[in-house]
Image (spheres, rainbow, N blue to C red):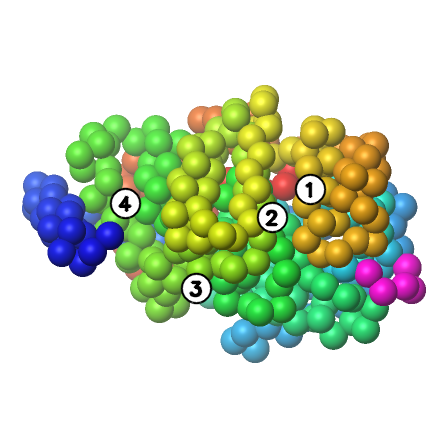
Amino acid sequence: MSPSAVTPIRRARRAGILAALAALPFAAAYRFALVYRVRAGYPKRHPPAWEPDAVGLAFEAFEIPTSGGVSIHAWYMPAGPDPAPGVVLIHGWESSRDRTLPHAQVLHAIGMHVLTIDVRGHGANAPEELPMSVGEYALDTRAAVAALRARPEVTTIGILGHSMGAAGSLVATAQDPDVAAVIAVAAPADPHRLTRQTFRLAKLPIPGVLAWPLAWLTTRVYLQPRGHTVASISATHAVRAIRVPVMLVHGTDDGVVPVTDLGRLAAARRSARPEAVTVTLVVEGGHHSWLYEFPEYRAAIGRFLAQELGGPLSPDEAARVAEAVPAVRLPDPERLVTLDEEPGGLRSLARIVRRNETAASTRVEAAPVLTTETGDR
């Protein structure tokens, strides 16, 4: 599309956003965005309740240095001493590396080395001082890829990420030449839509004509402390840039990230890179989490990774073996309720905004009261 065709559309869209914002008391909208950032940007940490030996996997526990002088906790689960592909697993929001163990079972069964991490601010890691976004997921994903690349037995590297981890995996893959393939499960298409979706999940009585401009403003205010731009953390922007094979997966009954986000990502990628490998899988009856409990999902990811990473099994054999793995969610001692089980489980942002105005200026260590998703549970 030529610049002359795009520019009027962009101008009209921006004019609409500005007009809608003008209808809001700007001070109230900005205050909302500040409070949202304080309350939504700091995940509640859940240290791992299980280790890989609980599912029969040998492992090495270690720490990986990442950006900003941060180190993150990790497990490496080798498939054996022989050279083979390796896969990095990235969990979702307010999750931890033990939630990825069913995926590790599947990948180990098809002969792949596995590395899984607690993203900064999650799991056994210390809390963060600035709000978390897809940007931090991407940085830690790249650090995990570098750690896996340093293993002499790893031949090629893939990434499998869930939800926020899926978006971070896509952004990391767009930037990292060491990644040979990526699987994004239940990935949010872009930051604006994710912010807008949190309004819906919180059941905020905001008319659509105002909700989108408010999401636009809130997203930008949210990203200011770390200096991210919307484009730099957008999965849609990333899939347009990725040259290596991409697999996009979503459940039809996802109550957190709508299945339509898969369609947006696939359309954006195929439009920008029609020659690239793009595989999509929509799991009938699948929710936001636990898609590894569906045999067709396990077979599909096994086939894709064996094909694109180069074995060690043939794609057909990997699909057969992966399908047969009895991967199920692990018991959760904390009994964390997911949004798939309780779609209205988000605490209302309306209550947050009605609180004392000083909430937006409190220290960031204040307890978060909003979650947008619940990771690989």
Asked whether residue 83 is drawn in magenta, I would say: yes
Question: In front: 334, or 3?
Answer: 3
Question: In front: 93, or 174?
Answer: 174
Q: Which residue is mark 1?
A: 301
Query: Element type at marker 2?
Result: strand
Q: CB of mark 2 within 8 Å of CB of mark 1?
A: yes
Mark 2 surroundings: few (<14), some (14-19) or many (≥20) residues within 10 A: many
Figure quadrant of the C terminus: top right
Q: Is residue 370 left or right of residue 21?
A: right
- Res 79 seen here: yes
- Res 38 seen here: no
* Amino acid bearing label 1: Ile
Q: Which mark is residue 193?
A: none
Expressed as whole percent of the image width and height from the top left, the position of residue 185 reads 57, 42
Q: CA distance from mark 2 to mark 1?
A: 8 Å
Query: Element type at marker 1?
Result: helix
Q: Earlier in the sequence, mark 4 or mark 1?
A: 4
Q: CA distance from mark 4 to mark 1?
A: 34 Å
Mark 1 surroundings: few (<14), some (14-19) or many (≥20) residues within 10 A: many
Query: Element type at marker 4?
Result: helix
Expressed as whole percent of the image width and height from the top left, the position of residue 197 reads 37, 37
Residue projecting furthest to the front: 275
| Foreground label between 2 and 3 | 2
Q: Is residue 360 left or right of residue 299?
A: left
Q: Which residues are magenta?
A: 80-84
Give the residue at x 73% y 29%: 295
Q: Is residue 90 above or below residue 363?
A: above
Q: Which mark is residue 215?
A: 4
Q: Which mark is residue 130?
A: 3
Give the residue at x 35% y 53%: 37
Expressed as whole percent of the image width and height from the top left, the position of residue 72 reads 65, 66
